[in-house]
Image: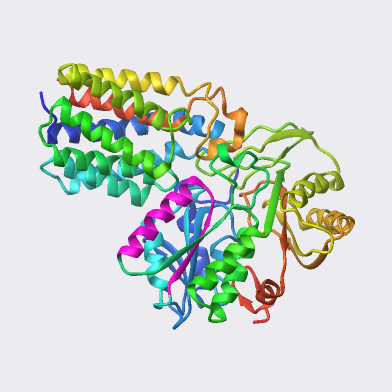
Amino acid sequence: MAIDAAGVHRWIELFAQAMAEHREELVRLDTAIGDGDHGTNMDRGMQRALEKVAAEPAADPGALLKTVAMTLISSVGGAAGPLYGTLFLQLGGGLTDHPAGDVTSYAAAWRRALDGVQSRGKAQAGDKTMVDAMIPAVEALEQAADTGAELDAALHAAADAAREGMLATVPLVARRGRASYLGERSAGHQDPGATSTHYLFESAAEALAG
Amino acid sequence: MKKLINAHDRVVADALRGVQAAHGDRLRVSFDPYMIVRADAPVSGKVGLISGGGSGHEPLHGGYVGRGMLDAACPGEVFTSPTPDQMLAATKAVDSGAGVVHIVKNYTGDVLNFEMAADLAGADGVQVETVLTNDDVAVEDSLYTAGRRGVGVTVLVEKIAGAAAEAGRSLQEVAEIGRRVNAQGRSMGMALTPCITPASGHPSFELGDDEVEIGIGIHGEPGRFKEKAGTAAQIAERLLTPIVEDLPFSSGDRVLAFVNGMGGTPLLELYIVYAEVARLAGEHGLRIERNLVGNYITSLEMQGCSITLLKLDDELLEYWDAPVDTPALRWGA
């Protein structure tokens, strides 16, 4: 099993589907500590990305992800547009530069995506952002690469780690983004960005695992 | 939820159609991407000024496009930052070769999108200077947050920097004047009711009948704390004291006092607040040289107000008084 264009296309479809299905959940989470637009924006952006990918089918995973990135940058707005845009742009760039499609190259592409998101948004671990789901997932992928795990196992380990990272945002006090204005009042709520990122890893496992 | 809309996903497009119908003689409205541009842009030799942000704060920013203020505005979806492609298109539409100032309210989304747009414009050879507004004293502890939000002072920056650009000042000078306005201005807001975004259909936070929310932003985000509703005099003092202490403003300072409605509060009440602000300013020894009272940076139908004080000097005063001709702010023109 390797990461190929058909798999990435399916991943994009499943993530778009997840954003549509969980739109209200994300709106509710974002209303509690942000401005309530995360679900709507991600759903709109991913629907556009799907249309774009269908209209311009690409033969390699990197190009597909770059199309998603550019569409999100120009259609999502908010912080999520540039942050998810950067994520997909760097992830696509990583897969283009390391096209093996194995766990090692996939983990390296994700590390690059994480670095990109952190340099754009300046968020650190524990700031109660999407980075809190990304870091454990990327570390799980790297650990899988180090131990020579199969791609399927790596994808599932990443999805599980993202879920745990997402759940671990609940008690945190937000230090970035709009939720940070609430100070202590942001504790006790799950971060919407970490939640959508968890769905991204979950749909990757579903789409790319054999 | 009842609203004067046709469909919740067409709110921005339908409002822009209205702007075009009402002001098409002086403004150019683009629907792809969304932007409102001075009909005579780019103005030869003049530094361009653009701003943008989520919709729902009207008349900010589109209402301030015109001679003496902004050259273009980029509206996003309700309470959602616009996107870099809009900002890039607006930047190019207003650049006469003298450069373009981006006026950006300090919100993570606005900042990230404008940063990307400035990178793209720079790559296309347009000089861009960014003026970030972050005047909201309700955000404490800014080391551990996204930083203070840009609120009321944004209107004053657009007016004063806009006049400086109209007067032929250079890119660096216009940006410096904008930054000075931000540095010398402070604001704080409060809400009597939350607002309801058309997409969510739900109030943005819960507030009891006898409660007010102190320290709100302009996107329906809750404030720092709730308290029992008091009189207008008590609320004015609640907002003004932290503002005065923060800069700090001191006895003898010349100021512009701005009482802003959040969208759903009648002018009758805003003037009641202004009377208290004038009284309190007097007690602090501040000399109010100019004022602005009304709904200028709003949060949909939220009831409440914000207070902004700007420390004036001769130059800022001259540019404040300079002619302005926009849909929402007009004098001397």
As rendered, which of A192 and B14 lies closer to the eye? A192
Nearest the eye: B106 or A21: B106
Question: In this rendering, is residue A63 above or below A27?
Answer: below
The quadrant of the image that shows the N terminus of chain B is top right
Which stretch did the figure color magenta?
B99-123
Write the residue at 67% across / 36% down: B224
Residue at image position (54%, 71%) is: B174
Residue at coordinates 77% horizontally, 58% vertically from top-left? B267
What colouring does the structure picture have? rainbow
When the figure is inspected, residue B239 is found, relative to residue B36, above or below; the finding is above
> Whole-percent x and y of residue B98?
43, 77
- For the C terminus of chain B, the image quarter is bottom right
Q: Which is the main secondary structure of the residues drawn in magenta?
A: helix
Rendering coords of residue B203 (x, y %):
61, 37
Is residue B196 located in the magenta-colored stretch of the structure? no
Specify whether B161 is left or right of A131: right
Residue B106 falls within the magenta-colored stretch: yes
Is residue A57 toward the left or the right of residue A184 in the image? Answer: left
The location of residue A79, given as percent across then percent down, is: 44, 44
Q: Is residue B22 visible?
A: no
Q: Which residue is depicted at the point 41% across and 42% down?
A: A80
Nearer to us in this view, A209 or B113: B113
